[in-house]
Amino acid sequence: MTAFGPLGGPAQHGGDSTAPNAPHGSSGIDGLPESFLQALGDLRRANPRAEALVEEVPAPSKLAPYAVALRAEVQTPVTPGLSAHPTSRLRPAPEEVETLATGRFILLHDPAGQKAWGGTFRVVIYIRAELDAEMGNDPLLGSVAWTWLCDSLAQHGVEYSHAGGTATRILSESFGSMENRQPSNDVELRASWSPSGTRFGAHLQAWADMVCSFAGLPPLPDGVIALPHIRRS
């Protein structure tokens, strides 16, 4: 069961549900090609972790003829008296919550293929989380983030190629009238890869697991490396 809405709507083709530039011979809803419709169906059947609140958002319109985008958040209640466990989409969220991690998952499709992709589909992800202030200079943080991504994809048994990405540590300090704000350290992971095969839902589930790991939740599968020092308070 997933929390995101019906895939294949206006966001799938740069905000135009009529898909006027669909290639000749395409079929399906609003002229979407069958290959993309099948991918949307597989994403719809995905079962990401319950702690990741997943919803569909507008997709970019200039990266490929067809695209779908999903957003995920892992939250924890901060209202006094509430348990400090991440909220589940199976129960109402409290009035005040703290976001531990956010992520974006984009599936691009170009029926003609793109040389840089090595295929007709491309997955692009983004994940961000705040760290404990004193842990922002951990030299292993970036390499562990990339290792976790590779391990998560392996745990879900997906095949892919042409993978690349960057892990960034961001230190924010405030001055002047904002000097009372505490310094913050964030970690960001931006990555992309080309799926092999048609198990697109497994790619989505691997990404949702990564967002949960960035939030400091223990991994569900055995053997997955969790990111160190993620802020849990």
Image (cartoon, rainbow, N blue to C red):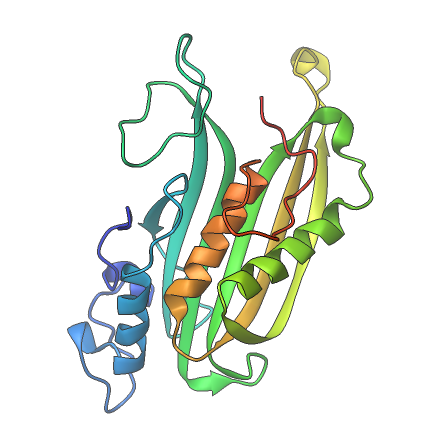
Task: Give residue 38's position: percent from left, percent from top.
Answer: 28, 75
In the figure, is residue 162 to the left or right of 105? right
User: Considering only vertical position in the picture, is 118 above or below 15?
Assistant: below
Q: Nearer the viewer, residue 21 or 214?
A: 214
Task: Give residue 24's position: percent from left, percent from top.
Answer: 26, 90
Task: Give residue 134's position: percent from left, percent from top.
Answer: 77, 26
User: Considering only vertical position in the picture, is 21 above or below 173?
Assistant: below
Task: Give residue 122's position: percent from left, percent from top.
Answer: 49, 72
Q: Residue furthest left?
A: 29
In the figure, is residue 74 to the left or right of 31? right
The residue located at (63%, 44%) in the rendering is 226
Label count reads 0
Q: Nearer the viewer, residue 218 or 229?
A: 218
Q: Nearer the viewer, residue 203 or 192?
A: 203
Q: Quadrant of residue 33?
A: bottom left
In the figure, is residue 222 to the left or right of 42? right
Q: Residue furthest front?
A: 222
User: Considering only vertical position in the picture, is 188 above or below 98?
Assistant: below
The residue located at (46%, 50%) in the rendering is 208
Q: Quadrant of residue 85?
A: top left
The residue located at (33%, 63%) in the rendering is 43
Q: Quadrant of residue 135?
A: top right
User: Considering only vertical position in the picture, is 47 above or below 19?
Assistant: above
The residue located at (81%, 36%) in the rendering is 137
Q: Residue furthest bottom?
A: 25
Q: Quadrant of the C terminus?
A: top right
